[in-house]
Image (tube, rainbow, N blue to C red):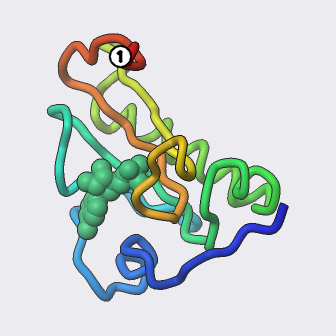
Amino acid sequence: MAYTYDDQNIFAKILRGEIPNDTVLETEHSLAFRDITPQAPHHVLVIPKGPYVTYDHFAAEASDAEIVDYTRAVGQICQILGLEEDGFRLISNAGRAGVQEVPHLHVHILAGRPLGRMLDKA
Ligand code: AMP
């Protein structure tokens, strides 16, 4: 499958420094920042710096170094926020069915309150 990356998406603009963000962690290949519309007391987005649309795109085309960096960045955020004891949820929406608003890979890290069941049954 060919993935098409739109470099005008809002996270691409954040990565270019064109719009501000509330950074929690920056690594060589990844950036983590607070979601502008938090849905839990902790709501952090982790994105790779490379131009990847979705998780499957990243898994297929990113370098090993990018994948290791990104995976570790997600884990580091959990440590920075102190989430080990109470737990957290990771979500990565992709495409139409996943209702992805921003077409640059991101993992949502949500925590700080009971998050309910994983999916609405509706
Ligand atoms: P998704 O529906 O998975 O694509 O989620 C996109 C997320 O990006 C939403 O939770 C938005 O609140 C968040 N978001 C959009 N613009 C910004 C921004 N400028 N800074 C931080 N988070 C943002």
Relative image position of residue 117 (x, y in whole percent)? 35, 11
Figure quadrant of the N terminus: bottom right
The image quadrant where one finds ligand 1 is bottom left
Q: Is residue 78 above or below residue 106?
A: above
Residue 122 is left or right of residue 63, and the answer is left
- Mark 1, Cα crowd under 10 Å, few <14 / some 14-19 / many 20+, is some
Q: Which residue is drawn at 38% across and 32% down?
A: 79
Q: Is residue 46 above or below residue 8?
A: above
Relative image position of residue 95 (x, y in whole percent)? 56, 52
**For numbered disc 1, what is the local secondary structure?**
loop
For the residue pair 101 and 16, the one nearer the viewer reads as 101
For the residue pair 64 and 41, the one nearer the viewer reads as 41
Label 1 beta carbon within 8 A of ligand 1: no
Residue 37 is left or right of residue 44, and the answer is left
- Image quadrant where residue 88 sits: top left
Q: Which residue is drawn at 45% across and 32% down?
A: 90
The three-letter amino acid code for the residue at tag 1 is Gly
Q: Residue at x 68, y 74 (%)?
A: 4
Q: In this view, does 92 lie above or below 29?
A: above
Q: Can residue 49 be seen from the camera position used here?
A: yes
Relative image position of residue 18 (x, y in whole percent)? 31, 88
Q: Can residue 23 be seen from the camera position used here?
A: no
Relative image position of residue 43 (x, y in whole percent)? 26, 41
Q: Which residue is drawn at 80% across and 55% down?
A: 64
Figure quadrant of the C terminus: top left
- Image quadrant where residue 2 sits: bottom right
* Residue labelled with disc 1: 87
